[in-house]
Image (cartoon, helix red, strand yellow):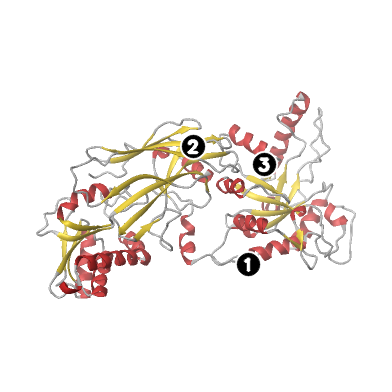
Amino acid sequence: MPLGQRAGDKSDSRYCGVEVLDFPAGDGLPAVLTHSLSSAFDFLLAPLVDPEYRPTPGAVLPVAASDLVLSPSQWSSHIVGKISEWIDLDSEDEQLRLDSELTLKQEIAWATHLSLQSETVDSWEWWNSFRLLCEHSSQLYVALDILSSLPSMNSLGRWFGEPVRAAILQTDAFLTNARGYPCLSKRHQTLLTGFFNHSVQVIISGRSNHNVSQVSEGVLSGDENHTEDTPTRHALSPYLEYMAYLYQRMDPLPEQERFEINYRDFLQSPLQPLMDNLEAQTYETFEKDTVKYTQYQRAIAKALVDKVSEDEVSTTRTVLMVVGAGRGPLVRASLQAAEETGRKLKVYAVEKNPNAVITLHSLIKLEGWESMVTIISSDMRCWDAPEKADILVSELLGSFGDNELSPECLDGAQRFLKPDGISIPSSYTSFVQPVTASKLHNDIKAHKDIAHFETAYVVKLHRVARLAPPQEVFSFTHPNFSPKVSNQRYTKLQFELPQDTGSCLVHGFAGYFDAVLYKDVHLGIEPNTCTPNMFSWFPIFFPLRKPIYVPSESPIEVHFWRCCGATKVWYEWALVAPSPSPIHNSNGRSYWVGL
């Protein structure tokens, strides 16, 4: 039974399991499963093989139960197998090491025969060795053991970028509240809430340390001779009820998160509006971002007030050009800013997409703006303006600021601007930070080619661990009336991880932008300064071909290049420390082509 209903959340974290501590010999497993399911647990973590077993010639594997005692659907839906804890593949004792290897193969083969969805092994060392030996296989997941003492939050935080499937919560980790019931410390509560938000299932493990219910040990141990006339409450039910309490008191997912939930960790190629004509559905999605256009309207209003004093309001008409007008949201924002400030406005709406121009004409006619708005069906780089503009407004920013060629487009369009003209945006800066992102790495790896690792993706980051604060990469300012300077850039960055983070893996770099539209009006997705409730941009992800191991307290050094050719712009990136990676080169892909 799920822990509860939370608006917008359909993840596996709603389900809670319980660990079977004693080996359920004979037909004990069905009894334990029936009792646990009737007590509202959703699945069992159970040993597959008698823990006393050691391989001998001709011996039959002493499994916990025949595959016939449960149906195939019960095995696959309600049982998680636990590999024998005595297995030690790295033992210095040769016989133990050989026995371990043989038994592990036998137990995995048995689990495969049962169609189990997952099984657990013991310790982080196992996990780290396994994923390296298996070349970071996407079929490997982590089950974290949660004890009474927790490491630092930085150390815990790195796990949110790893493939954590379950958290095994020991009963010894629980405190006792004033009524004698189990509860968790604030730090444990914070950790569990984070797990719930990342689709991590909780498994309760251990003996009951709270005398709030009674239950026969015969049922819990799987004693096949045990009988009772009346149903008994599971000894660990109070712990399950506390998990349900924690889950149910979480706030519902905000509307924006519900809108974005299907985009979590979903890799998308960045839009290329300079090369491609956007579709109506894409326009409609972005036009729904009222926060973005409210910021634009604020910036335009401030610029109009600065351009036209109160004494000049009745005699001065400001010329404003929207370059890349789309279907008209910036035109609307500009006219609303003029109405708000009482300024007169003449608008040129420049748009290269002929399909969007059709919509623009319909909008202008519908709103009665014919006397104020002139529509120009042209690429801004080719148009000869009949007059200079006081204000130049554009919506060419990408997830990384400049990745949709805003610098190149605005450098060409600024010829429309008066010497004292205002560009909105006036500047923007890109940022990156190293991340652990196992899921993204595996999704790219599934393509089985290097080209996909040399592509920057737009992605709603979710199952990632941000390892260090973002740092600035490239900055651009508009207008730039200085002699022509190349928009090619190079930056070297060094990140220091918090001392208590511990060792980790870097799968790539998350990229963001922050833009100054005008004066104090900002727009961006950089985590420390991001515009709240805005969804037009997701971060950009620069992957590494192979994950880089970062020892504790080791710095991370990365180099980024923005390269400009005659007809295209591309990025290059490479890790230098703690160990070098190849230079990743997005040149040759179709991204950002169209200069």
The first of marks 2 and 3 along the sequence is 3
Q: Can you say which quadrant of the picture contains the C terminus?
A: top left
What secondary structure is found at the residue carrying circle 2? strand
Label annotation for residue 556: 2
Nearer the observer: mark 1 or 2; the answer is 2
Q: Quadrant of residue 561?
A: top left
- 301, 366: nearer the viewer: 301
**How far is the residue under mark 1 from the one under mark 2?**
39 Å
Residue 389 x/y as whole percent: 16, 60
The first of marks 1 and 3 along the sequence is 3
As drawn, 177 above or below 449: below
Nearer the observer: mark 1 or 3; the answer is 1
Q: Quadrant of residue 279?
A: bottom left
Question: What residue does disc 3 label?
Answer: 112
Q: Can you say which quadrant of the picture contains the N terminus?
A: bottom right
The amino acid beneath tag 3 is Thr
